[in-house]
Image (spheres, rainbow, N blue to C red):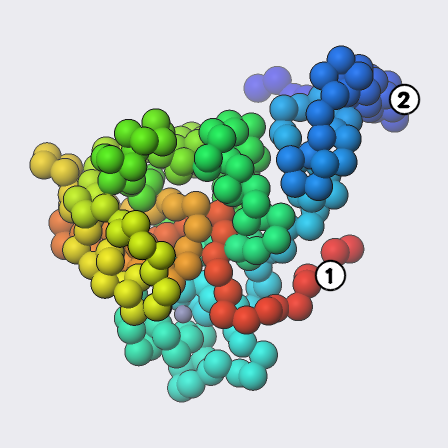
Amino acid sequence: MRQMMPLSNSRVTVVRWLESLAGAVASVLFPSGCRICEALLTRADRLPICDGCLESFRELPEEICVRCGQPWAEDGDVDGDESVCRECQERGFAFDAARSFGVYDGALARAIVLMKYERIEPLGAWFAKRLFEAVRGIPPQFAADLVVPVPLHRTRQKERGFNQVDLFGKLVAGKLGLPYRPVLLKRERARPDKHLLHFEERWEAVRGAFVIRDGGRVDNLRILLLDDVMTSGATLDACSRALREAGAKSVAGLTIARAVRQRIPVRERF
Ligand SMILES: [Zn+2]
Ligand SMILES: [Zn+2]
């Protein structure tokens, strides 16, 4: 096997100088601003978001419910079994574990909206890297055999032209060396257009909305289910239910971001 030779300090300096020069040239030839804060972009890549905005994404703390990944509330949301939150104990999600890269608010929420409505592929690739790292947080017994995206209803997919989950999902599966199955699950019932105000209405809207396509086989397989955002967990739950009923051995949900119940302190960066 060929080994990468470590670069000498002077070479690293030259490479960095060339990179910054390339970035500077690109910013002169193609001046553009960060799509979130409008600061001038000086990097040579095609990511339309500045470093400051990327660094402002709030990652989740390490202290989370082992099942659904919800950060612990400061007032102590612990009841009986200290590792599983009250919602998991009372509701009983159909997935075995859920994890996310960050908190769904601020610049991260805006970045996801950008990727989703403007089909920004470099952003999908950036998120794929973060999700690949976040997979490590999933308990080992739910390691996957297959990667499955949460599907859109066919009418929605036709309107948008693509499923936003495919923008990062294919790359996550590739990095994990696993098959990606975008047509295994089908959304039969579209999401109602009216804005859903109540938490329970969200559950009602997706109950039984997903089915396994004819010929789709998940028998005894461990599934990694991908979506862009987890809010109430109802969508991941409904997909997991369909997969479990079809014989899946386990389902672990993974999303770019998740809504958290209350503000959590910003994690210190060292
Ligand atoms: Zn910015
Ligand atoms: Zn939980």
Foreground residue among 203 and 69? 203
Position of residue 207 measured from the top left corner of the image (x, y, whole percent): 20, 59
The answer to whether 77 is drawn above or below residue 58 in the figure is: below
According to the picture, the residue beneath numbered tag 2 turns out to be 10
Which of the two residues, 12 or 31, is positioned nearer the viewer here? Answer: 31
Q: Is residue 85 above or below residue 216?
A: below
Does 185 appear above or below 56?
Answer: above
Residue lying at the far front of the rendered structure: 194
Q: Is mark 1 within 8 Å of ligand 1?
A: no
19 left or right, relative to 156: right
Hey, what amino acid is under mark 2? Ser
Front-most of 44 and 136?
A: 44
Q: Does the Cβ of the disc 2 residue fall within 8 Å of ligand 1?
A: no
Q: Residue at x 58, y 64 (%)?
A: 62
Residue 268 has which mark? Answer: 1
Residue visible at 40% across and 86% down in the picture = 80
Question: Residue farthest to the left?
Answer: 214
Quadrant where ligand 2 appears = bottom left
- Amino acid residing under circle 1: Glu
Q: Where does the image place residue 240, in percent across and percent down from the top left?
A: 25, 54
